[in-house]
Image (cartoon, rainbow, N blue to C red):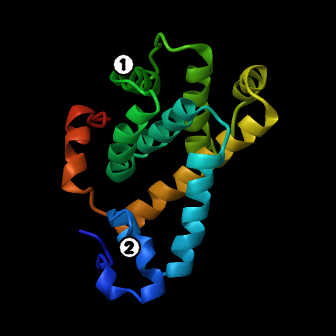
Amino acid sequence: MARLPYLNEEDLAEGDKDLLKRGMNLHRLLAHSPEAARRFGSVAQYIRFESTLDSRLREMAILQVGYLSKSPYEYSHHLRLGRDFGVTDDDVKAMENETAGNSSSLPELDRTVLRGAREMTNDLKFSDETYDTLRAHLSEAHILDLIMTIAFYNGVVRLLGALEIDVEPEFQSELDAHPFSKD
């Protein structure tokens, strides 16, 4: 159960009702601080709609952060959203295998993006090997956008956890289909 009450439009000033246009529990809690919610949303909007990083790679990195952090909210939402950007169930299974230290048939860039997300989540930085491989495949702008994405979503999973934000019932099926590992 969330640590703050979920707000509805009637709880907000007229100029802040737009914060709840998507109706997600995350937004319903962020609305307790409307300006913080807007700033949070600005970064999220850039990552999703303005970054030129390949959308599928972006979603793979976000899924890796959510899976590694065992963040049910983030993981369930991006399992569904990732499909819109080309992430398949086979990709998710490959990510689970990679996380467990096993190999997968994903292309080198995909594996490196996942490894980079794990390294930033666990060690706060890319290893030299990961960075060098990314440089061989991506522009400097894309590398920066990847780093921003991983860093932002590491923040998001911590916010979700600290506030104990509940997964909406319509996303539970995503977690049922792709549960977290037991370890």
User: Tag 2's secondary structure?
Assistant: helix
Q: Say if residue 98 shows up in the picture.
A: yes
65 on left or right of 97: right
Amino acid type at circle 1 is Asp
Measured as percent of width and height from the top left, residue 21 is found at: 38, 67
User: Tag 1's secondary structure?
Assistant: helix
Task: Say which residue appears at 20% left-offset and 41% top-offset.
Answer: 173
Which residue does the numbered mark 2 point to in the structure image? 29
91 on left or right of 43: left
Vertical order, 116 against 25 (above or below): above
Vertical order, 88 against 85 (above or below): above
Vertical order, 34 against 112 (above or below): below
Categorize mark 2 by other alpha carbons within 10 Å: few (<14), some (14-19), many (20+).
many
Vertical order, 98 against 142 (above or below): above
Q: Say if residue 30 shows up in the picture.
A: no
Closer-to-camera residue (21/147):
21
On residue 128, which mark appears?
Answer: none
Q: Quadrant of residue 91?
A: top left
21 on left or right of 150: left
Amino acid type at circle 2 is Leu
Which residue does the numbered mark 1 point to in the structure image? 90
Task: Say which residue appears at 64% left-offset and 47% top-offset.
Answer: 50
Task: Say which residue appears at 73% left-offset and 21% top-offset.
Answer: 137
